[in-house]
Image: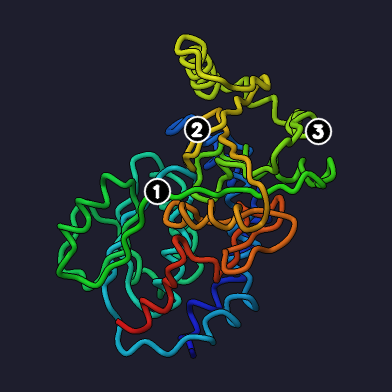
Amino acid sequence: MKQASPFLQSLPALQGFLKDNSAEVEEIINLARNSNSWFIPEFSKLAINSIADEFLDQQKVTSWIETYPVSSRPQKVAIIMAGNLPLVGFHDLLCVLAAGHQAMIKCSDKDSVLLPWLTAQWIRIAPELSSSIQYVERFEGYDAVIATGSNNSSRYFEYYFKSHPHILRKNRNGVAMLTGEESLDELKLLANDIFQYFGMGCRSVSKLFVPEGYDFKLFEQAIAGWKHLEDHHKYKNNLEYNFAIFIINQIPHIQLDHLILKEDESIASRIGCLHYSYYKDDASLQQLLNEKKDEIQCVVSGVPLKDWDHVYFGESQHPRLDQYADGVDTMKFLTIL
């Protein structure tokens, strides 16, 4: 897939800006935190650095888009952004621009600071892109839709956008598979997958699959480095509320200070909680995973699992360009419009 030069040529400058202009980046990160207290500087920096390293590397992007056909003609693509993580919708915007289309963006109220700032810097670097990036409150005259929301909002999306080509995403979460042979260092990396962004991302690990008889003592040591999250008032409030509910209702659980473990078949877990299930062998594990296939975004483990979007420990929040949400190839969708 060949791409017009302004998009590709602008990437090194934007990447450099994000990495080198620390004072300006710090300022916007603080503004984002004032707008949404979940967006602490630690996690906004993580999101910005991940974008710079994976999504703005000119060589990586060039190799990625060359695997797709040339779009037949520019289309107007409506993007409804999620707001659970800082800049969580950037990959969709990147795909739309890489495919040669125009983006009509509706930001989430929860993430209304960082993306407009980032695109303003991008347009300053490449003014030619100004006609391809538009922020709107209402969608009119669009040709296709990419919408990310909850299971509830997806029903509304399905009805409202049924007459247009679309990608509609629902709730998903990451899971991790442990064998019991993991080292302390591996489990520390897994702790990143659990605690980064307070566990609120679709790639955040919300559920562990562990072998029968698994001992959580080493796991408890591994997560100690994330105790500082307890200082965040919203996280602490969720933690205390969940603990109180479990105690009042006599729900079995394991209290690990800044994290509560609960044996539960569900994939999604509350903030401050982590679900786990036991498995007997590889066959039973595959069965457990297959039963929840539509709820799982990725599987984190030390060894890849066949037919699953596999991620090694510590890498769930650093997706590659070709690791698409819900397993739907966004670029393929966009290039055949």
Q: Which residue is drawn at 57% across and 23% down?
A: 232
Q: Which amino acid does label 2 sit on?
A: Trp
Element type where label 2 sits in the image: loop
Q: How crowded is mark 3: few (under 14 residues within 10 Å), some or many (20 or more)?
A: some
For marks 1 and 3, give the one nearer the viewer. Answer: 3
Say whether marks 1 and 3 touch (CB < 8 Å).
no
Q: Residue at x 49, y 44 (%)?
A: 85
Q: How crowded is mark 1: few (under 14 residues within 10 Å), some or many (20 or more)?
A: some
Camera sees residue 127:
no
Q: What residue type is labelled 1?
A: Asn
Residue 171's disc number:
1
Q: Position of residue 166 (x, y in %)?
A: 27, 68
Q: Where is residue 164 in the image (x, y as percent from the top left)?
A: 19, 70
Mark 2 and mark 1: Cα distance apart in space: 19 Å
In the picture of the structure, the residue carrying the numbered disc 2 is 38
Residue pushed farthest top? 248
Earlier in the chain: of badge 3 and badge 2, it is: 2
